[in-house]
Image (tube, helix red, strand yellow):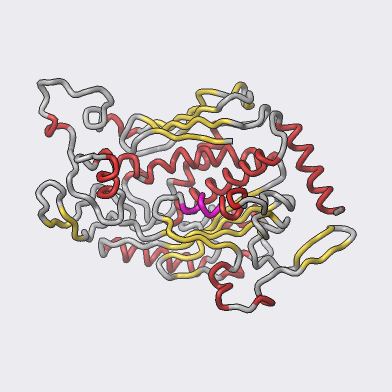
Amino acid sequence: MRYLTAGESHGPQLTTIIEGLPSLLPITSEQINYDLKRRQGGHGRGRRMQIEKDLVEIVGGVRHGKTLGSPVALVVNNDDWKHWTKIMGADPLPEDVDPDEIKRQVSRPRPGHADLVGGMKYGHRDLRNVLERSSARETTVRVAVGSVAKALLNELGISIVSHVTEIGGVKADPTKSEGKSTEEIRKIVEEDPVYCLDPEASAKMVQLIDDTKKEGNSIGGVVEVIVEGLPAGIGSYVHYDRKLDGKLAQAMLSINAFKGVEFGLGFEMARKKGSDVHDEILWSEEEGYTRNTNRLGGLEGGMTTGMPIVVRGVMKPIPTLYKPLQSVDIETKEPFKASVERSDACAVPAASIVAENVIAWEVAKAIIEQFHSDQLPQLKTQIDEMRKYAKEF
């Protein structure tokens, strides 16, 4: 199972083609749009979210609400395209047009972005050719892909949810998630302005975001994704590139501005002894093999243990600031203060939705790779058999 995306931040649309989905999987634009709306939410977002009202159009691979087994094609149109048709048009410019009048050429790289290094790599003197694709706008269509993956996981009895655990040093109480199902967590975070489980921490986060915005600055944070219902044995220990935790880590770090990832206790393990880190194995007639702790975040040896997967990612502060940083013009080599077009003071809540969806994709992909998956009913039967086998092993 794989997908590709295409499109620029101010281009006409974002496009993706998904290959490898089983046939007979229920998919609707309504369920995808639900996730796209969540990505645009969260306290701290900038004006772009007011301009774009992201809606998906399913243009291939689905008939009457179910997949056909052929590639699924999705399109999200950019409403702001009407203001950029000349600047971002695909056709060559007419000879009688002065390029400088319409291209909005960018020669001033912004610190923290892909502008300078991307220009070096692909030979672009106009850095707009870099920033248009490296923009986090591309995560819109990745959320759409993840929403399709979640539809598949839901059919297999696997649920996933994300929430914000920290913004700008303000940390949520970790006990707030204890004993709660993914559905219970979702009900709480969807009513919260920063998608946080802890109402006291949430209020402090909101205030900090507002104060930071007034300063012309930005702040980052930490998001957590929880996956429940996976049978033991998804992934593999026999090759480095088949380890599920490695795949999930790469997915998390592929999100714009993400710089760290951890599972379970994560980096806290460096400060603990082995007896306080590993999860003891229990067995009962009713449940089969279980663990009374989940310190390793549901993964051992690159494989699922049957416990919930718990993975966190850290997002750096957005580098596009109203309090500009020092840079150098690549044409004149003169120093300047980096400019800003639009910016979010904090995009951590929105990033939690992106994280949820890219993790969902990797989990669904691992399942598809491990089981026969031409048709959804076949896949359901195999997952049920895997759960029964693991319990009776």
Q: Is residue 249 inside the magenta stretch?
A: yes
- The image shows residue 166, relative to residue 84, as above or below, that is below
Q: Locate residue 336: give its quadrant.
A: bottom left
Q: Main secondary structure of the magenta part?
A: helix
Horizontally, is 110 left or right of 360 in the view? Answer: left
Most foreground residue, 356 or 295: 295
Residue at 38 percent across and 66 percent down: it is 207
Most foreground residue, 240 or 2: 240
- The image shows residue 118, relative to residue 195, as above or below, that is above
Return the x and y of residue 163 as percentages of the image width and height.
Answer: 54, 57
Horizontally, is 79 left or right of 63 in the view? Answer: left
Q: Locate residue 134: give its quadrant.
A: top left
Q: Locate residue 25: give its quadrant.
A: top right
Q: Is residue 31 inside the magenta stretch?
A: no
Residue at 66 percent across and 31 percent down: it is 22
Return the x and y of residue 50 as percentages of the image width and height.
Answer: 35, 43
Residue at 62 percent across and 32 percent down: it is 21
Return the x and y of residue 308 as percentages of the image width and height.
Answer: 67, 57
Which stretch did the figure color magenta?
Answer: 248-253
Residue at 66 percent across and 38 percent down: it is 368
The answer to whether one can see residue 187 in this image is no
Quarter containing the N terminus: top right
- The image shows residue 94, relative to residue 277, as above or below, that is above
Horizontally, is 352 left or right of 319 in the view? Answer: right
Return the x and y of residue 255 as percentages of the image width and height.
Answer: 44, 50
Quarter containing the C terminus: bottom right
